[in-house]
Image (tube, helix red, strand yellow):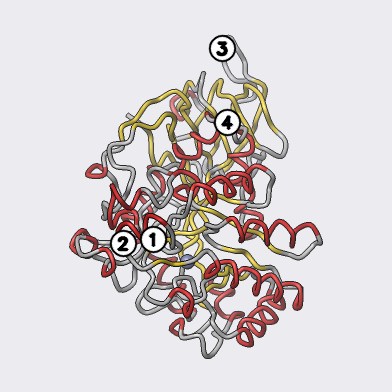
Amino acid sequence: MDLLLKGGHVIDPDHLDGQMDILIQKDRIQSIKPSVQDSGRFPDVSSAPDRLKIIDLTGKVVTPGLIDMHVHFREPGQEHKETIRTGSTAAVYGGFTGVCTMPNTDPANDSSSITTYILEKAQEAGMTKVYPCGAISHALNGIRTTRFDELKKAGAVALSDDGMPVTSSRLMRKALEIAKNVDLPVISHAEDLALVGKGAMNEGRVAEDLKIPGIPNAAESIMVQRDIALADLTGARVHIAHVSTRESVMAIRAAKKIGIPVTAETAPHYFTLTHEAVKTCGTNAKMNPPLRSAQDRTAIIEGLVDGTIDAIATDHAPHHPDEKNVAFEKAPNGIIGLETSLSLGLALVAQGHLTLVDLIRKMSVNPSKILNIPCGLNENASADITVIDLDVQNRVHAESFQSKSRNTPFNNWTLKGGPFLTIVDGRIVHQTS
Ligand SMILES: [Zn+2]
């Protein structure tokens, strides 16, 4: 079935902004034209009328398919938390036509056979496009590098030991040198484990009140600064994952100013919440890095506004309720985010921090540039499209999520704006009823 998306406000941050009609034939965008206001035929539509579905998108925003460049789908190995199928479905319900899956599965994605397995499962699921991130070191052990060329050949778009830092600066240097040769970005999970120690939440007043050991900001920013130094040394592309502190933002800003090839992402919880949330949400506000102070949250928003932080990614990290329903210090790190991310991003627009164009850039165009994957509303490009409803009000209901897990601090929040329609390769994979 061909699709005619009629009358939406089409925004592609690089080149489109206006009321337009988009014709999709098979898996491609056939044409993008200024909207024809009468109800007559779309010019040049060669589709037979019974083969064409027309969708009126008046009042809706049509954007390049959103890309979440940092998710954990838990397959292989921990399918009780999430599978590639349930994660992919959660992604399209959240408006994402593409996701980058982190390699800390069990076994880790440290070989071409695991990368191929992930891609086959994603193909079977037939929902979002999955772009696997390969491991830097075997079993994420930080000792020996994997075969980056083979991972890339199998379909990996980036390299990371996410979940674990690359503690050895020497190994990180070597990894960056090889990654530069095969032209893949390296995603840095910046964490000084010795400084984290037994810490389980942000170091500060709230941790003292709750008598929970703290993690200082420096545990992140020390490693951010190291990896910036190594990007400078090697000329390789470093992408800093889940930035949570003011000091990290300052370091990345300074590095960009002098042309070091560093990019960065943050996650919705870091610009929405502070460590105060631990008091009310308990283990559903436990993640790594932890929620920080109000001052850090402000710095994260400033980093998004001035372009220091290029991308918004969820760090979608599903865990079973039995695993989260334990003492705070024993609970695993991470929260799910795919089905609330766009709405939380739109809140930044409503608050006047970002323009809608900026938000779309950070949730589609920029991740695609960092990972070197296709994105954009162009004639003859793959029809990967997200349609946003800016006016809808939704109460978050974790029990209704497509994700297998429920670990969100945003349950029962009322959020304005969200995904309306998700199209992958010309197929409607999610439509709000
Ligand atoms: Zn990480």
Are the residues at dot 1 and dot 4 in contact (C-beta closer than 8 Å)? Answer: no
Circle 1 crowding by C-alpha within 10 Å: few under 14, some 14–19, many from 20 = some
Residue at figure coordinates x 59%, y 80% from the top left: 148
Find numbered disc 1 in the image and state the secondary structure of the residue it sits on.
Answer: loop
Q: Which residue is mark 3?
A: 40
Disc 1 versus disc 2: distance between alpha carbons? 20 Å
Q: Quadrant of the N terminus?
A: top left
Q: Which mark is residue 83?
A: 2
Q: Is residue 420 above or below residue 104?
A: above
Which badge, 1 or 2, is on the more N-terminal residue? 2
Residue at coordinates 63% horizontally, 35% vertically from top-left? 357
Residue 371 in which image quadrant: bottom right
Farthest top residue? 38
Q: Earlier in the sequence, mark 4 or mark 3?
A: 4
- Name the amino acid, label 2: Thr
Residue count near mark 3 (Cα–Cα under 10 Å), binned few <14, some 14–19, many ≥20: few
Queried on whether the Cβ of the residue with tag 4 lies below 8 angstroms from ligand 1, the answer reads no
Going from N to C along the chain, the mark reached first, 3 or 1, is: 3
Q: Residue furthest bottom?
A: 144
**Amino acid type, mark 1:** Met
**Residue on which disc 4 sits:** 23
Q: Residues within 10 Å of mark 4 (few under 14, many from 20)?
A: many
Could you give the CA–CA distance between mark 2 and mark 4, rounded to whole angstroms? 33 Å
